[in-house]
Every structure is written in C-alpha cells, then in structure tokens.
Image (cartoon, helix red, strand yellow):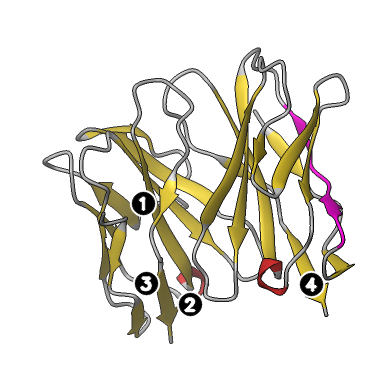
Amino acid sequence: GAGVSQSPRYKVTKRGQDVALRCDPISGHVSLYWYRQALGQGPEFLTYFNYEAQQDKSGLPNDRFSAERPEGSISTLTIQRTEQRDSAMYRCASSLGGGLPYEQYFGPGTRLTVT
Amino acid sequence: AQKITQTQPGMFVQEKEAVTLDCTYDTSDPSYGLFWYKQPSSGEMIFLIYQGSYDQQNATEGRYSLNFQKARKSANLVISASQLGDSAMYFCAMRPNSGNTPLVFGKGTRLSVIA
C-alpha cells in the first residue's frame, strides 16, 4: 500500500521567499506530525494534528511557520520569508491515533535549502 | 517533559556479530512507549521495534530485540547477527501513552558493520 508521501522532495529557494511543503499521510491515519531534522541530529517536533485539528504547535520556531490540515488528510507546512537557518530536512509522519501508542510512519522528507 | 540520551555517536561491529546500541530516557509520565528507528543513507526513517512501559517482556522483532530495564530507564537495542545492510543511523524515541503526542528523539548512533 501507499506510504506517507511528501512533495517536493527537494526545494531550493532564495532568502525571503515563501515555501509550502506538502504531506499526504497514509489513508485512514488520524494523526499527522511535522518534524524538522538537522544534519546528524534526530528529528525535532514542530506541530501535529488529530484529524483537522491542530493539537500542538509549540515546536514551531516562530510565527513565520504555520501548518494546516483542512480536511483531516493532506497537510501543508508553510514557511514565510525564509531564512538560511530554515535549511533542513522537513519530515512528515502519520499514525493511526486513537490514543494508543501506534508507531509513526515517516515520509521521505523535503530537503529545503535557503540560499 | 521527556528526554532521550544516546551516548554513542558511532559504533563498529563485525559482520555476523551482535551489537548493543544504548538508550536512556527520562520522563515523569507513568505510562509511555519506547521506539527505535533506522535511518539508512537513503534518508528514510524505518520503524524497527516498540516497547511499552508496562510490557512484562522485552520486545523482539526478528534480529532486533529491546533490552528494557525500567528501573534504570534504559531501552537498549540489540541487533543480532549483524549484516552489512544494518549500517545506518539508529534513533531511540519515546512518547507518553496518553493521546497521540509526538515522539521525542535522541541524537542517534551511527552503526557501521564491517565485513
């Protein structure tokens, strides 16, 4: 079956531009998570959703970052006025949810480079 | 708050030998789950194994087993009969069992399997 997909896989943008990163979770998965992974580090939490409701956005670095999941399926992470420090791998994950500790399935990530 | 510590930045193991990757954690949650993920050079995140804090037995999945010592707050991953394809980054992660909260990851251990 189809796993978590993310697009684009690679994005190079100039400082100051806005970018939108897309995540398509596994069908039927309730929970969707966004993480950011710097080179040589583990993923760090950004925000997550149960269905269409954003449950926690405490990991978003600042107000240039926002995320939505309007129909409880596909999610978009938007970074406005990008800066070089935003360069990283952005990963999306989904899980069945339901309050049980189901594993999270990760997408391939979007490698963002801000020049 | 939860914290994961992986103290081994890199490990080497001879092919066909067993290797243990260390993971210690800190949490105030009474019920939680511990996870291990593998990240090969291709960049994907592959779920390996899960251990619940109230599970009486250590989790096993094929060549992977989790040496869970609750009193010591450790959840070490044991890989038996190492293969060249096991060379990768390995991340330990945890989250409370209540709700669909995001994972907290350690910094990872890079395992290199030598022929």
Q: CA distance from mark 4 to mark 2?
A: 32 Å
Q: Residues within 10 Å of mark 1 (few under 14, many from 20)?
A: few
Residue B65: quarter of image? top right
- Most foreground residue, A107 or B2: A107
- Most foreground residue, B95 or B14: B14
Q: Amino acid at mark 4?
A: Ser
Q: Residues within 10 Å of mark 4 (few under 14, many from 20)?
A: many
The residue at which mark 4 appears reads as: B112
Q: CA distance from mark 4 to mark 1?
A: 40 Å
Q: CA distance from mark 4 to mark 3?
A: 36 Å
The subunit carrying tag 3 is A
Q: Earlier in the sequence, mark 2 or mark 1?
A: 1
Q: Earlier in the sequence, mark 1 or mark 3?
A: 1
* Residue interval drawn in magenta: B17-26
Q: What is the quadrant of the N terminus of chain A in the image?
A: bottom left
- Most foreground residue, A47 or B68: B68
Q: Which mark is residue A82?
A: 3
Q: For marks 4 and 2, give the one nearer the viewer.
A: 4
Q: Considering only vertical position in the picture, is B72 above or below A69?
A: above
Q: Which mark is residue A84?
A: 2
> Residue at the spot x=49%, y=65% of the render?
B44
**Discs 4, 2 touching: Cβ within 8 Å:** no
Assign the magenta stretch its main secondary structure. Answer: strand
The residue at which mark 1 appears reads as: A63
